[in-house]
Image (cartoon, rainbow, N blue to C red):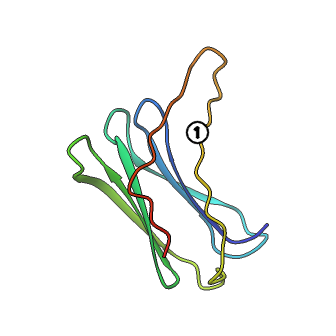
Amino acid sequence: DACLVMVALTPNGICTFAYRRRPAERIIEVRMAGPNEAKALRLRRMGNRFEATALNKDNQPVAVQTADLPEMSKEGALGLFVCSHEVLLLSKATFSQIQSR
């Protein structure tokens, strides 16, 4: 039930940005890019503002979403993961240029 920010990229290129502004509120999810549009994601934090960018195969932005989370702690956890909801679908990901400052 804490404040949170997530970006997700599915194997077919659909990209979503989700966040919860305050503890116990509902998570807001926004679709950023449709099928086969996004190949990479970038998530940046600038104070209380979070910016999610979906990038195409040439690393050019195809969509940008932002959210202000004034109650988000300055300290937080960062997690990277690969998740598949299909038994017969193998999902792989490459994590590169990861920075946490």
Q: Which residue position is annotated with label 1?
A: 82
Name above or below for residue 78 compared with residue 32: below
In the rendered structure, which amino acid carries the disc numbered 1? Answer: Val
Q: Quadrant of residue 21?
A: bottom right
Label 1: how many residues lie within 10 Å, few (<14), some (14-19) or many (20+)?
Answer: few
Using the image, determine if residue 37 lies above or below residue 64: above
Q: Residue at x 33, y 33 (%)?
A: 36
Q: Residue at x 69, y 72 (%)?
A: 3
Instruction: Identify which residue is drawn at 37% across, 46% down.
Output: 40
Quadrant where the N terminus sits is bottom right
Residue 86, above or below 63: above
Q: Position of residue 23 (x, y in %)?
A: 76, 74
**Element under disc 1:** loop
Camera-side residue of 14 and 88 = 88
Residue lying furthest top: 88
Which residue sits at x=50%, y=31%?
92
Taking the image as shown, residue 45 lies to the left or right of residue 78, namely left
Q: How many marks?
A: 1
Q: Left or right: 42 with respect to 25?
A: left
Residue 27 % position (x, y): 66, 60
Name the side, left or right, on which 16 lies relative to 64. right
Question: Does residue 25 sit above or below 93 in this rendering?
Answer: below
Residue 43 is situated, as x and y percent measured from the top left of the image, at 44, 63
Tell me the quarter of the picture where residue 2 sits. Answer: bottom right
**Which of 82 and 29 lies nearest the eye of the viewer?**
82
Query: Which one is in front, 85 or 74?
Result: 74
